[in-house]
Image: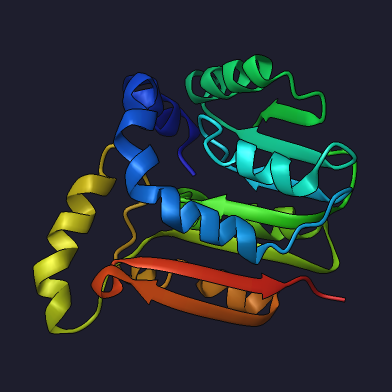
Amino acid sequence: MDTEKIKRKYRRIAWLYDRLTRAPTDRLRREAVQLLALRPGDGVLDLGCGTGLSLPLLRAAAGDPGVVYGVELSPHMLAHARDRVAAAGWKNVRLIEANAETFEIDQRVDGILCFYTHDIMLSPTALPRAIKYLKAGGRMVAAGGKLARGRRGWLINPVTVLYSLPAVTTLDIERSFEPFALMRQLLSNVDVKERMLGSQYLAWGVGPG
């Protein structure tokens, strides 16, 4: 991943990010967190947590005994997440400014969420690194935008590319048809649902071992 380019892009949009994305992604975000099947006391990793829009849902699922890790490369996005955590008074949410390809956390977790993290999903090293922290039988859930195949792609793909440009730096067309492909290699029982004429996906699988 081009980390400096990512930081520049999110520096420009961090102040507007929640207003642009909260409502359109809320339903999908809730479904993604539900698929993690977290229980009170569980640990969960929000990889590419951004401004922290998923943190309230993850924290509610893990409860007071659990722990929520949020890893984010952009300091400007993470500043909003820190404000969110401080305002809520959460003591068990740990935010880490780090590259998804090199981050570290101090325990294995029961779930991993990647929500609209296209660059992370296409990185050859970020997902393998994250999954090494996933307990055997733990779940990973990913959701985001993708390119649609066939005739409908001619209609909807230009729109998908246009709204993705402010945030995405990995412009790999072929892999953008299946940004969840690496999940199939690394996890068991991977399932995928496509939404919005194939321009959005929800994928989940179980950790190895």
28 or 155: nearer the eye? 28
Viewer-closest of 45 and 12: 45
Query: What is the residue that sits farthest to the left in this orientation?
Result: 155
Q: Tell me the quarter of the picture where residue 8 sits.
A: top left
Q: Which colour scheme is used?
A: rainbow
Res 103 seen here: no
Q: Compared with residue 38, is residue 153 higher up or lower down, i.e. above or below?
A: below
Where residue 176 sits: x, y (%)? Answer: 35, 65
Q: In which quarter of the image is residue 14?
A: top left
Q: Is residue 112 left or right of residue 173?
A: right
Quadrant of the image occupied by residue 156:
bottom left
The image position of residue 77, as x and y in percent, is: 49, 25
Q: Residue at 87% x, 51% y: name it.
A: 108
Residue at the image position 56 percent from the left and 33 percent from the top: 52
Instruction: Estimate the x, y position of residue 7 in percent, counting from the top left.
Output: 44, 26
Horizontally, is 78 left or right of 157 in the view? right
Above or below, 183 against 110 in this view is: below
For the C terminus, the image quarter is: bottom right
Q: Is residue 36 above or below residue 74?
A: below
Residue 198 in the figure: left or right of residue 106: left
Q: How many labels does the image show?
A: 0
Rendering coords of residue 27 (x, y %)? 43, 55
The one of 167 and 122 positioned closer to us in this rendering: 167
Q: Residue at x 65, y 36 (%)?
A: 71
Q: Does any portion of residue 152 appear in the rendered image? A: yes
Q: Which residue is drawn at 24% across and 74% down?
A: 197
